[in-house]
Image (cartoon, rainbow, N blue to C red):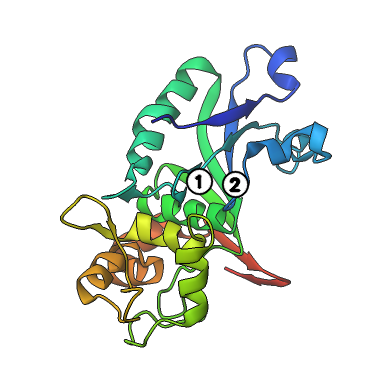
Amino acid sequence: MTVDGAVILPKQYFSETGRKFPVVFIINGYGSDYHHYSKENGDTLAAFPIDTTACIKVFLYGNYRLGHNVYANSENTGPWADALIREFIPLLEKEYRCNGAFLAKGHSSGGRACLWLQIHYPQLFAGINASAPDPVDFRSCVKENKYTEEPIKNYKYDYEKVIYRGEQGISFNAVYGRRDKNGQVRHLYDYTTGKMRPDVLEHWKRYDTSLYLRKNWPRLKNDLRVKIRISVGNELRY
């Protein structure tokens, strides 16, 4: 497996050869990739600085065959967080003039990935901007409370088991779920009966961002102060 990304250097990188720059990771959402940000597609996001500060932009590609890895360590999908932090970033620092300041921004699955990285590596990241992140509280996860046992809706069966390889629910199961006896992804729901599997739900809880923060807030609060910005629609929450 590879951790893929596109590095965009600011023009000052070439004119100020002794200068080091902060790094902004931009993480794609479910189904998109870093090609979305190319000038050929009409998007010039790669060019803008933060305020007046020139930055190295790194567009990360979080998609793989089962969906989006959200850069979390997972029993099924692998140690994506460890690979990014322990392998990708050290290589980036070796190859480019980085000044040690790392920020991240992303939308949807990319926003959830940014938030996950910030709360699990609070001293490494100087701040994140998560736009409409995937569900960060499983009490409200795609309009369902995962902690109340209710039969799965028929439309989910259609999407996840009939259409192609499934929709985003398959991606959630791959990252948050556990393996079955054959080494395959054990899904949260039994798609035949519509019943939730309690053992899988216990595994999912490890990835409930809100639950993690509530449990660990006394330890995290000083390192996370003013580092998290979440926006959904026209509303902004700090």
**Percent x, y of residue 229:** 58, 61
- Is residue 22 visible to us here? yes
Q: Quadrant of the C terminus?
A: bottom right
Q: Nearer the viewer, residue 108 or 226?
A: 108
Residue located 55% across and 31% down the image: 5
Dot 2 falls on a residue whose secondary structure is loop
Q: Quadrant of residue 23?
A: top right
Dot 1 falls on a residue whose secondary structure is strand
Give the amino acid type for the residue marked by disc 1 in the picture.
Ala
Numbered tag placed on residue 28 in the rendering: 2
Residue located 52% across and 77% down the image: 155
Residue located 28% across and 63% down the image: 206
Task: Describe residue 22's horizontal placement relative to residue 52 as left or right.
Answer: left
Give the amino acid type for the residue marked by disc 2 in the picture.
Asn
Q: Quadrant of the N terminus?
A: top left
- Is residue 142 visible to us here? no
Q: Residue furthest left?
A: 181
**Percent x, y of residue 110:** 55, 52
Label 1 crowd (10 A; few <14 / some 14-19 / many >=20): many
Numbered tag placed on residue 147 in the rendering: none
| Residue 223 sits above or below residue 12 on the image | below
Which residue matches tag 1?
126
Among the two numbered marks 1 and 2 on one chain, the one whose residue lies closer to the N terminus: 2
